[in-house]
Image (tube, rainbow, N blue to C red):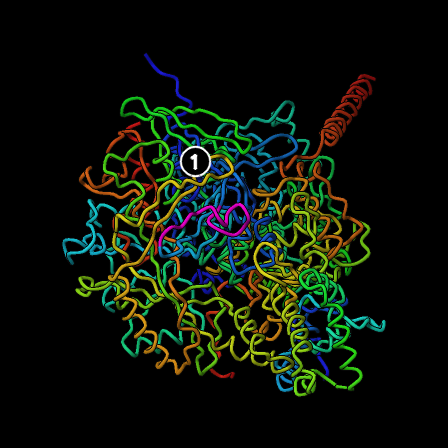
Amino acid sequence: MAVVATLIAGVGLRAGGASAAADAVTIARGRYLATAADCAGCHSVDSGPAFAGGVALKTPFGTLLTPNITPDRETGIGAWSDEQFYRALHLGVGVRGEHLYPLFPYDSYTKLRRDDVLAIKAYLFSLPAIHQVTPPQRLSFPFDQRWLLGWWNLLNFRAGEFQPNPTRSADWNRGAYLVEALADCGACHTPRNLTLGPQSDAQFAGAMVGSWRAYNITTDPVGGIADWSNAELTSYLATGVAAHKAEAVGPMADVVEHSLSLLPAQDIADIVSYMRLVPGIRLRTQGQSRFSWGRLNNPVIDIRGNENLEHPTGRTLYYGNCAACHGGNGGGTTDGAYPSLVHNTVVGASEANNLVMTMLAGVHRTVQGHMVAMPAFGAVLSDAEIAALANYVLNSYGDPGIAHVDAAIVAAWRAEVQPTPGLVTAFWASLGAVMLLLGVAAYGWRRWRRH
Amino acid sequence: MTYNIAVINRDADMTSSTRRQFLRAGACAAGTLALLAPGKLMLQAVAAGDAKPATPRVALSRFLCGWPNLDERIVARAFTALSATDGAFTAHAEALWQAITTAVIPDVSAFRASPLYAEATHRATALALLSAFYLGVVGSGDTAHLVSYEAALMFASTQDVTPIPSYAIEGPGAWGSIDHAASG
Amino acid sequence: MATQFDADVIVVGSGVLGSLTAHALAQAGKSVIMLEAGPRMPRWQLLERFRNVADKSDFNRAYPDQAWAPKSSGGPHSDDYLQNVGPLDYRPGMLKLVGGTTWNWRAAAWRLLPNDMRLKTLYGVGRDWPIDYDALEPWYAKAERALGVCGNTADDQSGRGGAAFPPRSQDYPLPMLPWSYYTRTIAAQVEAAGFAFCDEPSARASQPYAGRPACAGTNNCTPICPIGAQYSGDVHATLAEQAGAQLRENAVAFRLERAGAKIVAVHYQSPDGKPTRLSARAFVLAAHGIETPKLLLLSELANSSDQVGRNLMDHTGIGVTLLAREALWPGQGPVQQGAMLHWRDGEFRRRHAAIKHALGNAVPNRAVAARLLAQGVIGPELDRRIRHDAARTVQLATAFEMLPEPSNRVSLSGSKDALGLPKPQIHYDVDDYVRAAAAVARQDHRRIAEILQADVFDADSGWRNGDHILGTTIMGADPRDSVVDGDCRTHDHENLFLATTGVMPAGGVVDPTLTGAALALRLADLLGRSV
């Protein structure tokens, strides 16, 4: 990968058009682009063959299984032409002319240049063909009606390759291509509108990913990352760690491990250049930044010999489960290998999701061969115990104002319960309203035509 | 003797200053501290002392340990445990403190060199109390009393190098890169 | 006519060997019930119990002490459970809770040497195993994977400083943990003087493994790993349940019932004495080396050889504490990292026992402080001396191989426990084979002290338990002088197997858990295909 990175420093135009003949350089570029776009993140099951699909993605409308994109002719994309592949990424259209579900982020990939798209195809076609059937999508009515996605596209989608902005630097433009066309940070970090399209006026202002929260990464000084140094941002993206401040957990840990940590240093620098110019937005009331909360504390004299282990408090659970690594006082280890919970961007967030999810699921992140792991306490602690523990951590090291986690919400987060039917109803209602309006307009038009 | 509290990040009662500032202070302080008092590094468990005048038992405990901030709750636990096994202990402790203050003995080193320490009861009292604070336990077996664990003073003088068992001090495998050959 | 059974297989004991067996059988599609005498306890609670316990000199004390399932020590119900009637007070580590005694161990995970299994043939002492190393080797490899063992594949573990030995079909699944300065320095110095020093393979995650985090060096392996980097039997107890095995805790098995030569049921009591009978096609006793023979004796089973309970062996040993000239700083990393193996194998085994000197790496502050206070040291000098002496403390734990003696035995005492069952009675002594080795070992200790320019601090530790219970249900080819065959099947009862280190007819001089695990996986495989 280092060799590839040297060959293909950064994102730039390639001389020569895409061609059907796959040469080594094109394939290498395609592998690089597929890494930046983290295709494997959705199309590869962890323990399974590469790109054979079958990953289950939960949405409010049901669960979608990702397709097989290996060059198998029957069950994968082996029979696809260059044009068909390009239309899939550029327009979100499948080989039978059907709309693809926008969970596949064609609204980002539309920005990819044609020769880049075909380089990705060349890379995929260089891989082993895996015969693995993707079961047909099983969303409930009406969301199984793909033609409705035409409306989604109308509301949310503008096709078109990336156009460099001549008023911005070359670094920024490369960063924009990486962020908007490839890595698609907005897929997680941009809040969704009622149709689950991205809110264009709230780019990167923070959104939910299952039970996890993808934080506000705009330049807002309190809600976002304006106060992070370039070194911290660079380190975080490239390794998953900004020392003594932040650690990538949950889905972001996967992104770092499978995509960002494998990109050349110039790419990370370009992403940072781009993010520095994103307008600052703060959607939620947030009095102080995520990394400004907490103090070391010292409860051990109170608890030592005084605990009720049959009915433990959050503090007792902290000592039994967490203190060995994170310190009795919450300070972690000096080298930061076990992070401090004080001034910690997950502990100090304005909602408790990621803290609880990290406790439940643990942390698993391997970067440059270095494995970082925190156990999954969801396997050994009940919802009530997790709630008590979370509240102790929030009261001691985070925002006490949100220290009211209960067992019910832990259970819901554990199950990655999707947003309630309210959203679904709103979507259907708004769609119905649009159709009604168009119906009325069509009727009015006919009547006008008759006269 | 002064104690610099800003040595290790595991200190108690840090305010909202950033860890980085704290660790920088620690790096400077460590060198000074090593010269002054290699044994007097801060425990993670010992609270900052308060300004109230101490009772005789607290004063005696702090005097013997050489630790002006020794937590009163630990002192209380030690005295409860020692009195449970020896009904005369409290009286002996108060007599010892009385003797120390009367003789105006300035610190525990002077006490050790003084005739008071040669007196059997005073010596036994002092050692019983110190044992409680250093080992964290009074007695043995099923009837032993816990005084402290993490706050046990037996760990205080080595906690920059070795862990209080069951607590990590660095990340996985970090001990593999440590070389003590330079230090003594 | 088909008989209704409560399960295909009932496993008595949920420690590492019982849980490995139950898990393998459940994965093979068998219905399994596990019976555990003790309760189920989460790790966090055991950890806080340890931190809260006042007298930490006996690590067993951190564990729950229950009247219906006594431990080997560490509580009012447990302290007089084992009734020693011999010259030595034999009190090996034994816990009763889901996951068993490996909650509290140092995770040493050695293989036997091929020669360890041929003592009689090669050296004219003790007994041969009825199977050889090659038969066990593939199961060692599986056991290392199951327990997550880290080690140095290139080591010559026979102590001769040669090529990798014993033979292995697979590398260790995890790389060895880095040595601390203490271990590196001592290893280099003793090696230069001719004592072969070897890394101790251990069931410890040196990097994240199967959901366990990597070792953080909290130096608390015994009594309990705070984070689960070190393997403990609850890992496979949980996996067995996830694979479909049913685990009943607080269920004290007290009798096996037979019809003819077949075992048909096990009877167990709950803490309030209420009895339950469960039937199965086959039974595996995995109740460790004392309770397994006790259950057989209570049931009057499997004992046509009169060897049940006899031939009790351990790795009884001696210890020494040295005070080195230079600061070495024991206490960084896990509590034990390596051993001197120059007496592991050789012709000398005709005359005296094999010897292993394990280098202890525990934080020594408690013993150091207690000693200084006993000397009346107080004030700043106390802190200075604690730091000075703790940095220079070197601990050696020396183990000896024992030979099977029928008079070293577990039998039924006349005293009864809280459930009305006889307590185990133990007669135990060491013989001249061990005493001769102890004299050699003490010479080694003096030599090592010279090498490290150390004062010998505490030379007279007396005999110490090794916590390795061997021989009490001894394996052999001849039913007249052994309890189980090479497959761990009892000679007398075709459907009764024993998954315990008590089957081992010779233990070498290494901790037996990995060998027990290999035997358990092997018998589970056999049983899974035949039951």
Q: Residue furthest top?
A: C1
Other residues around mark 1 within 10 Å, as few (<14) / some (14–19) / many (≥20): many
Q: Where does label 1 land, which residue? A: A76
In the picture, which quadrant includes the C terminus of chain A? top right
Image quarter in which the N terminus of chain A is found = bottom left
- Expressed as whole percent of the image width and height from the top left, the position of residue C335 reads 46, 63
Q: In which quarter of the image is residue A381?
A: top right
Left or right placement of residue C513 versus residue A371 in this view: left
Q: Is C166 rendered above or below residue C283?
A: below
Q: In this view, does C411 lie to the left or right of A76?
A: left
Mark 1 secondary-structure assignment: loop
- Where does residue A449 sit, x and y in percent of width and height? 79, 20
A265 or A41, which lies in front?
A41
The residues colored magenta run C71-86
Q: Residue at x 33, y 57 (%)?
A: C315
Q: Measuring 41% from the left and 81% from the top, which residue is drawn there?
A: C454
Q: Which amino acid does label 1 sit on?
A: Gly
Residue under the image location 63 percent in, 65 percent down: B136
| Residue A177 showing in the rendered view | no
Residue C264 versus residue B21 in the image, above or below: above
Q: Quadrant of residue A224?
A: bottom right
Q: Position of residue A261 (x, y in %)?
A: 53, 58
